Image: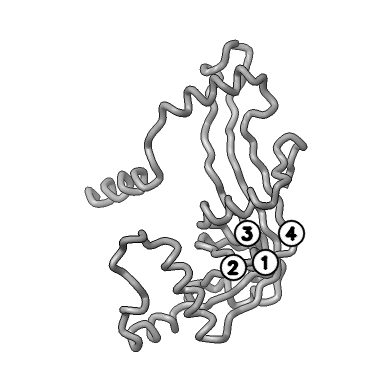
Amino acid sequence: MYIPAHFNIKDETLSFNVMKEHSFATLFSQHDGMPYATHLPLILNKDNSCLYGHFARPNPHWKDINNQTVLAIFHGPHCYISPSWYETKNAVPTWNYVTVHVYGEVELQEDEHELMGTLHDMVSKYEAPDSSYSLQNVDAEFLAGMNKGVQGFKIKINKIEGKAKLSQNHPLQRQKLIVDQLEQFSITTEQQISLLMKSNLKK
């Protein structure tokens, strides 16, 4: 990834935070000799040495990914920056964003208990603290059948690159003007998904 010095995330803790808070990632590898991508949640283990996830078994991506070095991209927050927010008209638009690239080797999970452990971790991460849902309350036979439809894997992390393009190359006063404008926005990702679902319901 191209990372100018002033956009480079040098603190690995910040990169780990992006991976945890924006864990729906894009996983790239080679499949049948071509680049192939799957969009899926990836969970960091406790010592930040591995990422865990699972493919739907009908997805052919997993069939030749074992032992491959792959790239997982975590897309942090991003947005359009209008030059109309600046103190001058001699400017052009840009895009601010935070992203983390993770490289590592894939190992397919063959142990059912290991897979269940990662599935429990994933549900615990995304369910609200007061949610009534728990995998422990799901019928064991039903859950075993569902597990046959997924292929678990882990990525042993060997390289992390982080980039935070946040107008650091602009004067401080201009950065403050941008912040003032951005603070006026309130729509969330959840609201955007809701609007898209509503539009589909009308079709």
The residue at which mark 2 appears reads as 45
The residue at which mark 1 appears reads as 49
* Horizontal relation, residue 147 to residue 75: left or right: left
Q: Earlier in the sequence, mark 4 or mark 3?
A: 3
Residue most toward the bottom?
141
The Cα–Cα distance between marks 4 and 2, rounded to whole angstroms, is 16 Å
**Residue situated in front as seen by the camera: 23 or 56:** 23
Say what secondary structure mark 4 lies in.
strand
Q: Is residue 55 above or below residue 139?
A: above
Q: Are marks 2 and 1 in contact (CB under 8 Å)?
A: yes
Which residue occupies 59% across, 77% down? 63
Disc 3 vs disc 2: which is toward the camera? 2
Disc 4 vs disc 3: which is toward the camera? 4
Task: Tell me the number on the disc at residue 155.
Answer: none
The quarter of the picture where residue 140 lies is bottom left
Residue most toward the left?
202
Q: Is residue 37 above or below residue 182?
A: below
The quarter of the picture where residue 70 lies is bottom right
The Cα–Cα distance between marks 4 and 1, rounded to whole angstroms, is 10 Å
Which residue occupies 54% across, 73% down? 60
Going by the numbered disc 4, the residue's amino acid type is Lys
Q: Position of residue 141 (x, y in %)?
A: 34, 88
Q: Are marks 4 and 1 in contact (CB under 8 Å)?
A: no
The Cα–Cα distance between marks 4 and 3, rounded to whole angstroms, is 11 Å
Task: Tell me the number on the disc at residue 72.
Answer: 3
